Amino acid sequence: MSLQLEWSNDQDRIAIPESYIERLKQLLEIAGEAEGITKGEVALTFVDDAGIHQLNLDYRGIDRPTDVLSFAMQEETDEELDILYEVESEDEALPFEGVLGDIIISAERAKAQSEEYGHSLEREIGFLFVHGFLHLIGYDHGDEASEAVMTGKQEAVLSKAGLSR
């Protein structure tokens, strides 16, 4: 099994071309390779602002739409991950496999942000997807240092795929 992307489109305001999905599969492979993750499944759903607003309220208690949400299926503490890497590195297995989690992207937010930042919708969706993937495998951006790490990783993946700013 390799990294797999399962996706659905639960909105009808923004067309999501098949070429975008192929690009997201490429980004998943590049990001997975960069993080040493070669197995697993990511579920991606495109929603509208109303849909992501409701999810943001239900799961985070934040009463507004956002651009991307991630729901990790393999959440571990840092200590647990250290133990997994030590134990499983002996037989070269990776601690992440199976269902990694869900990424929800607001297609409306992505379109608005692509216009605001002056780049393509494909690049914005790619950025949000990689951002969501990094959250699934344990990255966060709660402080400046961790935000810089995530930003660097996101930009490296996007650049490798030809989606730099």
Image: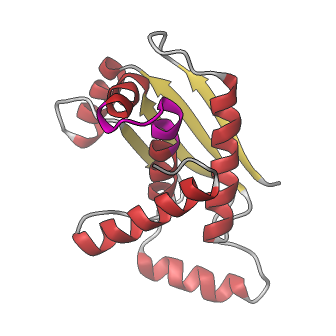
Q: Can you give x and y, in whole percent of width and height, for residue 116 in the image?
A: 29, 33
| Direction from residue 1 to residue 7 in the image, left or right | left
How many labels, in total? 0
| Direction from residue 33 to residue 149 in the image, left or right | left
Q: Residue at x 54, y 15 (%)?
A: 15
- Between 45 and 88, the residue placed more toward the observer is 45
Tell me if residue 8 is in the magenta stretch: no
Position of 37 relative to 26 (above/below)? below
Q: Can you give x and y, in whole percent of width and height, for residue 76 in the image?
A: 47, 68
- Name the image colouring: secondary structure
Q: Can you give x and y, in whole percent of width and height, for residue 117 in the image?
A: 32, 38
Q: Residue at x 30, y 39 (%)?
A: 59
Outermost residue toward the top in this view = 12
Give the quadrant of residue 78. bottom left
Q: Residue at x 43, y 67 (%)?
A: 152
| Direction from residue 6 to residue 71 in the image, left or right | left
Position of 27 relative to 114 (above/below)? below
Outermost residue toward the left in this view = 63
The rendered magenta stretch, by its main secondary structure, is classed as: helix
Q: Can you give x and y, in whole percent of width and height, for residue 38 in the image?
A: 73, 63
Quadrant of the snapshot with the N terminus: bottom right
Image: magenta residue range: 116-126
Q: Residue at x 51, y 51 (%)?
A: 164
Does residue 47 show up?
A: yes
Tell me if residue 122 is in the magenta stretch: yes
Does residue 98 show up?
A: no
Position of 110 relative to 89 (above/below)? above
| Direction from residue 63 to residue 90 in the image, left or right | right
